[in-house]
């Protein structure tokens, strides 16, 4: 996220401090601050682990795993969906169409994927800040079945869900790097 004062981990590994330990975002209530720090950390990890991958690697499905491109689209778009529920709304036709297009769409470039992610994080920031000032016990519902959650539960799920898929990006990136190294070593 653009407002993070923390140096990028790939550029200064010895001095990198995880966002939650950086003393940043103190203007945001604690729950919202934790969510924004999780998004900052996801941004850092995604940048670090995808920087040396080709567009073909980002769109590959090694060993049948979902592609990194899928995870990046899913992170970006699910943040909007979860925040919509946190705000008390229901998904729009556009959000539903984007959900259906996350997997199996046309190949995407790294820059296009990261631009979508950066935009999603930037748009999420003021929404998270506003929601973090509200009563986190406020009832909310999710989906057509109107499953019960709380505003706080939805807000925290933005962080949980983002980190889950970021972990999958890192694991898949490491697998792709290992496969590439194995192929190179076999020559």
Image (cartoon, helix red, strand yellow):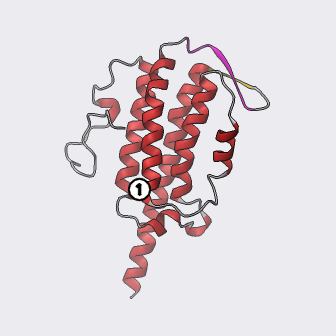
Residue at the image point whose x is 38% and y is 37% from the top = 40
Would residue 11 appear left or right of 28 to someone viewing this image? left
Q: In this picture, is 56 found above or below 118?
A: below
Q: In this picture, is 95 found above or below 20?
A: below
Would residue 134 appear left or right of 88 to someone viewing this image? left
Q: Position of residue 174 (x, y in %)?
A: 43, 62
Q: Between 108 and 143, which is closer to the camera in this rendering? A: 108
Residue found at the very far bottom of the displayed protein? 187
Residue at the image point whose x is 78% and y is 32% from the top = 144
Q: How many marks?
A: 1
Name the quarter where the C terminus is drawn.
bottom left
Q: Position of residue 1 (x, y in %)?
A: 37, 38
Residue found at the very far right of the displayed protein? 145
Dot 1 alpha-carbon crowd within 10 angstroms: few under 14, some 14 to 19, many 20 or more:
few
Residue at the image point whose x is 66% and y is 40% from the top = 94
Please say whether residue 139 is one of the residues in the magenta stretch.
yes
Please say whether residue 141 is one of the residues in the magenta stretch.
yes
Q: Between 25 and 130, which is closer to the camera in this rendering? A: 130
Q: Position of residue 130 (x, y in %)?
A: 48, 18
Q: Which residue, given by chain and number where applicable, does mark 1 sit on?
A: 111
Q: Position of residue 171 (x, y in %)?
A: 47, 57
Q: Quadrant of residue 29?
A: top left
Q: In this picture, is 135 found above or below 65?
A: above
Q: Secondary structure at mark 1?
A: helix
Give the magenta-colored segment's residue range.
135-143
Residue found at the very far front of the displayed protein? 94
Q: Quadrant of residue 49?
A: bottom left
């Amino acid at each position: 996220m653009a407002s993070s004062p923390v140096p990028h981990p790939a550029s200064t590994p010895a001095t990198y401090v995880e966002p939650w330990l950086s003393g940043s975002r103190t203007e945001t209530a604690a729950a919202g601050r934790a969510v924004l720090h999780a998004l900052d950390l996801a941004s850092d990890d995604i940048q670090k682990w995808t920087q040396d991958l080709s567009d073909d690697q980002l769109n590959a499905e090694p060993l049948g795993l979902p592609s990194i491109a899928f995870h990046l689209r899913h992170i970006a778009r699910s943040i909007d969906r979860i925040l919509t529920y946190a705000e008390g709304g229901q998904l729009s036709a556009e959000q539903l169409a984007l959900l259906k297009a996350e997997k199996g769409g046309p190949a995407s470039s790294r820059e296009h994927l990261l631009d979508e992610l950066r935009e999603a994080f930037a748009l999420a920031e003021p929404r998270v800040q506003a929601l973090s000032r509200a009563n986190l016990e406020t009832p909310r519902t999710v989906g057509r079945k109107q499953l019960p959650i709380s505003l706080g539960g939805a807000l925290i799920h933005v962080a949980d869900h983002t980190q889950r898929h970021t972990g999958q990006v890192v694991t898949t990136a490491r697998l792709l790097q290992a496969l590439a190294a194995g192929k190179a070593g076999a020559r």
